[in-house]
Image: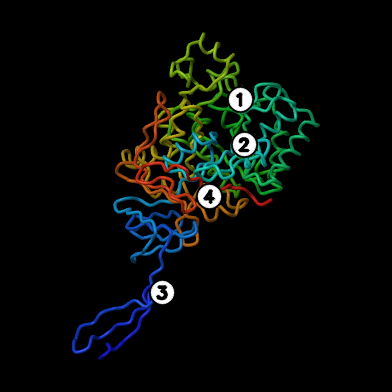
Amino acid sequence: MTRPRCLTTSLVAGSVICCLLLAPHSSSFFVIPTQAREVYDVVVLNGRVIDPESKLDAVRNIGISRGRIEVITSRPLSGRFVINAQGLVVSPGFIDLHQHGQNEENYRFKVMDGVTMALELEVGTGDIDSWYAEREGKTLINYGVSIGHLAARMAAMHDPISFLPTGEAARRAATDLEIAEMKRRIEHGLRRGAVAVGFGIQYTPAASHWEILEMFRVAAQFGASCHVHMRNAGLKEPASSIQALEEVIAAAAVTGAPLHVVHIQSTGGRATPNLLQMIGEAKSRKIDVTTECYPYIAGMTEIKSAIFNEGWQEVFGIDYKDLQWAATGERLTKDSFEQYRKTGGYVAVFSMTEEIVEGALKSPLTMIASDGILDNGKGHPRTAGTYTRVLGKYVRQQRALTLMEALRKMTLMPAQRLERRVPMMRNKGRIQVGGDADLTVFDPDGVIDRSTYQEPAKYAEGIKYVLVNGVVVVKGGELQAGVYPGRPVRASF
């Protein structure tokens, strides 16, 4: 018997060693692999891979194993689960820094909007350990929280702890002893791994400037960013949004604490361009300040909160007809406003214009965040539609942003805001070898929001696949049941 002769050996892509053989009595060659090609847990094939950090924007294949990205290549890959992403965009999973709804209902709508991480950083919580324990092993997406000044203030003043203060904590100045107790609680929360410190200063209008400075000082000791709903809104002086931004930029400059201003367009209204100019100028002077916006002309808040104290019409430049009751969709009158003000509940506040919203979205300073919450299907459409609305309306339809710019605002910028205090964020918001496999795969020609103010609980369209830590949670546009790969986002403690 005549054996074929091995003429050469070669290493193919670092994993497949082949022997080139010559058949007996023939000039034909054939290849026999002597080592099998690596098989990944998941592979994503032929997608348009966009990484805002490296600026990669090209068709690539991605191999994922053990929840990490192992390879990004143009060569063929093999996987136990294969996603054909031809004609689709493969992006880092979207990171929402401002999501109040932190339960199963809200996580479902977030992930169908392409979000792989939702963090409650504005209001936060008063008990870090309990907050994380409630969600351990039960979440579709990654989750995290700040230690909240609001909760610390309610506790220090012996008010019942609620989402937003309505008792003493909403109405009066704190004593020196109460401020000291707030500082102690915030420090404890940061020592227990809180991502940041949350502030809702407009909900506590009697809080002194010194009180806020003291909280910033604690944040600065831990390198924690201060996520601030500012004290004032609109243009009315002396209590304008410009004055409110001066307060927190000064607090950041005095203490060294990083500052993140939430929903700049909602607080600023017509003053938004001025506020963005101020933030840009502060950054040019090496003050660590960032901001965010959402793509809707209405905000939403609790009608019993201090935001609707006497004079709110002049502050926001609106009237009762510009308020919409979330539970029924009705526009309010003076009588219905006063009735609901006694009972409490969520109200949409139509205080912005498309020009204000688009201007904020286009600014290179802004990230995208939702400020979302749904409760039994009621709430604001931004919970279910923020990210797909940006991609569908403002990228594809209006071309206000390029796709790369929009994805940078949704992924890399939020990750970078937090990575100094939370090192795990260095592996988020990117598509890079060694990074966590949080990926959103979407149809750039079909992605769009479907939620409305009348029907806020409607899934977005065009999100085809979502992976959280390498686990497929959306497959072919359908939410997968019984998978909980979300992990806690938490600082070292």
Dot 3 falls on a residue whose secondary structure is loop
Which one is in front, 105 or 200? 105
Going 55% across and 27% down the picture, which residue do you hit?
A: 233
Label 1 sits on residue: 238
Q: CA separation, marks 2 and 4?
A: 18 Å
The image quadrant of residue 167 is top right
In the rendered view, does 156 fall on the left or right side of 37? Answer: right
Looking at the image, the residue that sits furthest to the bottom is: 2
In the rendered view, does 77 fall on the left or right side of 293? Answer: left
The reply to whether callout 2 and callout 3 are in contact (CB within 8 Å) is no
The tag earlier along the polypeptide, 2 or 1, is 2
Label 3 sits on residue: 14
Vertical position of residue 133 compared to residue 174: above or below: below
Q: Which amino acid does label 1 sit on?
A: Pro
The reply to whether callout 1 and callout 4 are in contact (CB within 8 Å) is no
The tag earlier along the polypeptide, 2 or 4, is 2
Label 3 neighbourhood size at 10 Å, few (<14), some (14-19), many (20+)? few
Q: What residue type is labelled 4?
A: Ala
Label 4 sits on residue: 415
Label 2 neighbourhood size at 10 Å, few (<14), some (14-19), many (20+)? many
The reply to whether callout 3 and callout 1 are in contact (CB within 8 Å) is no
Label 2 sits on residue: 124
**Residue 436, percent from left and from top:** 50, 55
Dot 4 falls on a residue whose secondary structure is helix
Specify whether residue 54 is in view: yes
Q: What residue type is labelled 2?
A: Gly
